[in-house]
Amino acid sequence: MKKLSILTLVVAFMLVFSVNKSEALFDVGVKYWFSELDSELQVTEAAILGDTIDLTKEIGLPSKENFLEFRVVAGLGSHKLRYIFLPMSWKGSSDIQRNIVFGGETYTVGSTVSGDLTIDYHRLGYEYDIIDTLDNKLGIIFEVKYLDIVGSLQEPLIPLDEKGEIALPIPTVGLTFQIGLPSFFTVGAEVTGMSAGQYGRIIDAEAAINFAPVPFFRLSGGYKILNVHGEYQDNVVDLSIKGPFAMLRFKF
């Protein structure tokens, strides 16, 4: 009886681990991104043109921060719907070295100014895999990206507290591919982007090496780049965020 129970567990274990990856309906993942920020922000208010500010060099926002990205993919065969959410925030302070016009107000040289930048980055898209055989894949992605970007500066002694917001929806297209390697490894990359003229442009690209010892689990390590230019209601933002990442994904 004991041997039968053990055999039953072994068979069940083998059945679970032998599920074909194409049968998985959902793919959920969490990415930990070791990012580095390079950013400029200009906030205009009441026709008072704002200065272009380097937020890391002039306001003291940390150039390096780590963030979590969450993704859910629902698919059947070669067709997939994807939603990805990446919230980011930076805070810092500095004694500014020049007069800065921001949000219609002037922050005077020598003042201790605190600042913060927050970005909620949403991606909703459709992926069609033109090739999907064994561990090799080539797909095309149609995606709407939406960035809600808020920057603010505070000078408590005067006091001053101004902020600017840029809402940036951009439809994008892109490609994704994967190549199978021996011993449960694959390499892959993905790039999506689009230019909407002066209104905004975005490029989101990453490459990774993946380890999948069982069909429903994957561990990845790679590098990600996000470049954004956006203009909204006379506010302008330029962002370059890049760095290595680690990711866990589960299929069921």
Image (spheres, helix red, strand yellow):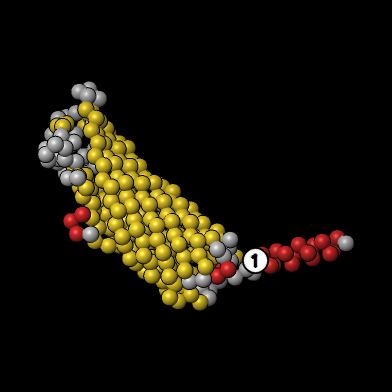
Relative to 218, is 42 above or below? above
Give the image location of residue 179, x and y in percent. 45, 73
Packing grade of label 1 (10 A; few <14, some 14-19, many >=20) is some
Relative to 107, is 128 above or below? below
Identity of the residue drawn at 34% across and 67% down: 174
Give the image location of residue 161, x and y in percent. 24, 30
Give the image location of residue 115, x and y in percent. 27, 35
Label 1 SS: helix
Residue 95 falls in image quadrant: top left
Residue type pointed to by label 1: Phe
Q: Residue 187 or 150: which is nearer the viewer? A: 150
| Residue 167 seen in the current view | yes
Identity of the residue drawn at 19% across and 41% down: 43
Identity of the residue drawn at 48% across and 53% down: 30
56 relative to 210 in the view: left or right: left
194 relative to 130 in the view: left or right: left
176 relative to 110 in the view: left or right: right
Residue 162 falls in image quadrant: top left
| Residue 180 seen in the current view | no
Residue 142 falls in image quadrant: bottom left
The quadrant in which the N terminus is found is bottom right
Residue at numbered disc 1? 17
Q: Residue 58 or 148: which is nearer the viewer? A: 148
160 relative to 208 in the view: left or right: left
Identity of the residue drawn at 21% across and 50% down: 231
